[in-house]
Image: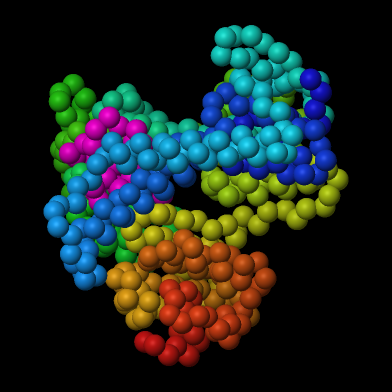
Amino acid sequence: MNYDVIVIGSGPGGYVAAIRASQLGLKVAVVERSELGGICLNWGCIPTKSLLKSASVFEYLQHAQDYGVTIDGEAKADFAAMVKRSRGVAEGMSGGIQYLFKKNKIDVIKGTGKLLGNKKVEVTTESGEKQEYQSDHIILATGARSRQLPNLPQDGEKVIGYRKALVLDKQPESMIVVGSGAIGSEFAYFYNAIGTKVTLVEYMPNIVPVEDEEVSKQLARSFKKAGIKVMTGAEVTKVDTSGDKVKTVIKTKKGEEEHEADIVLSAVGITPNLENLGLEDVGVEIENGRVKVDEFYQTSVKGVYAIGDIVPGQALAHVASAEGIICVEKIAGHHPEGLDYGNIPGCTYTVPEVASVGMTEKAAKDAGYELKVGKFPFSASGKASAAGHKDGFVKLIFDAKYGELLGAHLIGANVTEMIAELVTARKLETTGHEIIKAVHPHPTMSEAVMEAAAAAYDEVIHI
């Protein structure tokens, strides 16, 4: 019952931390009350991408003639089959984590973990049995859940969160999605693509509000073109679930409007899972609703660490994984570099996709930088034209004085696969001219990165 490291939670923060700790020669156990892989693999990143792929295939079939392909008969969206496929993909990934744990000799303790102090963890099984475990280092990686708004209570039937949206019994004819961050926008795209009438409601002036304003406006145009009703500067103030449909009151600048739909999806952020962990009992300090940690994720209690959605920083799977690796490398006596939260990529897997890293143009101006901004539209890209995906652009923001890449903002087909180049460029402090001189293959979508850099320095060829 004694371990070098016990990790509570097996999501992308917890399982990565556990595997890296084992690689470093530490004896490791993971406490998990549900499926291995956490929300990301089971109810987030992976199953949503499966649904989005199904929607993408359906859209391709609907536009097959655009590519010179004739299909006899009508393509239909089989919602139940799409959901079944997504669950199968998630289960396969969760099984993969089980294999990795076995390969790395990591013990899995099924149940709910709680800190007891004195380097002890209490685990309660589903049957209510309690068992204590000892460890010099305890890592909290308990993740988060869908945030509930007082004026938008979720009943799990007509007003739902993202988990329920993945496994609805039948496809709704109409849906109101509240919140246009990555989760809300992805579900809005998916359901609209397979034939549901979708209204997307966003409180801020632009959808995907953390993105550069030009990207937000382009995505809104694409959504509207696809048939999604986009309402910005809007707020759902009332819901009535007493009838067959959900009746809502949406407050806008022009006044209040009444809308109804089969389903309302609340996608207004997340709430960290901090309850019943024994944090208060052992003295772990909380600040602004998150666990307070140092740059290596040590909490206010020696030997207790926290990573992922329960600590400050972007609530993203790849952030949690990076934090987990840094945390255990420090525990093992290595000297890891702290995480640069200013160089974290963000991705939204809509059509078109959105990907970004670093400062928006507004943030860079507000920070006092003199800028060189380059933008290259995919309408001028040979590969994009051949693929039939000309919507979007690459926008790069440079410091005019030193040539530093301050931010990169992409919207278009497959741009989530392109952003890593720009994350690496920023990590290596690459300049604009170095990107221009780095030969990019032709024809590719990634040429737009080189062209956007060239546009910033008035050297662009193809526009």
Q: Compare residues 450 and 117 and report the one nearer the observer.
A: 450
227 to 418, vertically: above or below: above
444 to 367, vertically: above or below: below
Percent from the top left, x then y, of residue 458? 46, 89
Q: Residue at x 62, y 67 (%)?
A: 424
Say left or right for 399 vs 259: right
Residue 339 sits in quarter? bottom right
Q: Compare residues 150 and 263 and report the one nearer the observer.
A: 263
Q: Residue furthest right?
A: 333
379 to 336, vertically: above or below: below
Q: Residue at x 24, y 41 (%)?
A: 78
Residue 431 sits in quarter? bottom right
Looking at the rendered image, the quarter that the C terminus falls into is bottom left
Magenta span contains residue 176: yes
Percent from the top left, x then y, of residue 239? 24, 29
Residue 413 showing in the rendered view: yes
How is this picture coloured? rainbow
340 to 309, vertically: above or below: below
Query: How many dots with numbers?
Result: 0
Percent from the top left, x then y, of residue 42? 48, 36
Residue 64 sits in quarter? bottom left
Q: Residue at x 56, y 69 (%)?
A: 422
Magenta span contains residue 257: no
Looking at the rendered image, the quarter that the N terminus falls into is top right
Say left or right for 70 vs 291: left
Say left or right for 207 vs 327: left
Residue 270 showing in the rendered view: no
Q: Residue at x 86, y 45 (%)?
A: 333
Q: Compare residues 185 and 398 and report the one nearer the observer.
A: 185
Q: Residue furthest front?
A: 72
Magenta region: which residues?
A: 165-194
Percent from the top left, x then y, of residue 398? 54, 76
